[in-house]
Image (cartoon, rainbow, N blue to C red):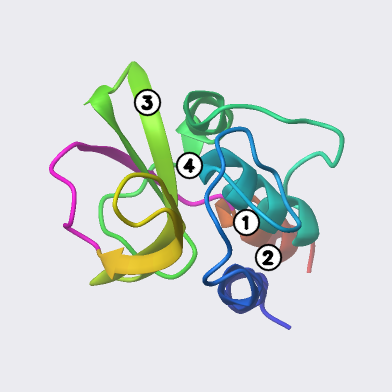
Amino acid sequence: MDLRRKAIEIAFSHYGKPYRWGGNGPDDFDCSGFILDILKKTGVFPPDKDITAHDIMRYYAGHTVKRPYLACLAFYGTTPTHITHVEMIINERAVIGANSGNINMVSVQKFDYRDDLQKICDPYKHFYEMREKYA
C-alpha cells in the first residue's frame, strides 16, 4: 500500500477522538501526538521519540514543498522559528489534525482555516526518493 494513503487511513481512524494536551493516543491526542502516531505507524519516524510540533518541523525541514498535497504536514506558528501546531494535509483544500479550543477533537478543517501557516513539509519524500534510487 502507498504510504501516503496509509497515513490518511490512519489519520481518519482517529477522527472524532478527543483533544488532550500532551495526548499521544490511542484514546486522545494533541497535535504532535496525532502526527507522530501516523508517522511512526507508517515507518518514517523513530518509534521511541516523542517531540513537539516545532521539533517535527525541524526533523523534516529539508523536505519542504511549495504546494500542499496528500499526507504532507502543515506547520503553523507565529514565525517560521516558532511552530505551535501541525496537521496532516488531505488535499489542497483540507487538513486533518487534533485541535483544541472550540473544536477539541481530531477533525477535518479547510486548508486555509488558520492564517499562520509557516511551512509545508513532505515526510515521505525521502522514503520515495530512496526507493526510486535503489529500485
Front disc: 2 or 4: 4
The residue labelled by disc 2 is 132
Q: Residue furthest top?
A: 81
Mark 1 or mark 3: name the one nearer the start of the chain. Answer: 3
As helix, strand or loop, the secondary structure at mark 2 comes to helix
Give left or right: position of 70 versus 120: right
Spatial separation of the CA atoms under disc 4 and disc 1: 11 Å
In the image, what residue type sits under mark 1? Glu
Q: Along the polypeptide, which appears first: circle 3 or circle 4?
A: 4
* Label 2 Cα neighbours within 10 Å, binned few <14 / some 14-19 / many ≥20: few
Q: Nearer the viewer, mark 4 or mark 1?
A: 4
- In the image, 126 versus 78, the foreground residue is 78
Does 16 lie within the magenta span?
no
Name the residue beneath numbered marker 1: 129
Residue tagged 4: 63
Q: Which residue is mark 3?
A: 83
Among numbered discs 2 and 4, the one appearing first in the sequence: 4
The residue shown at (63%, 43%) is 33
* Three-letter amino acid code of the residue under disc 4: His
Asked if residue 63 is positioned above or below residue 92 in the image, the reply reads above
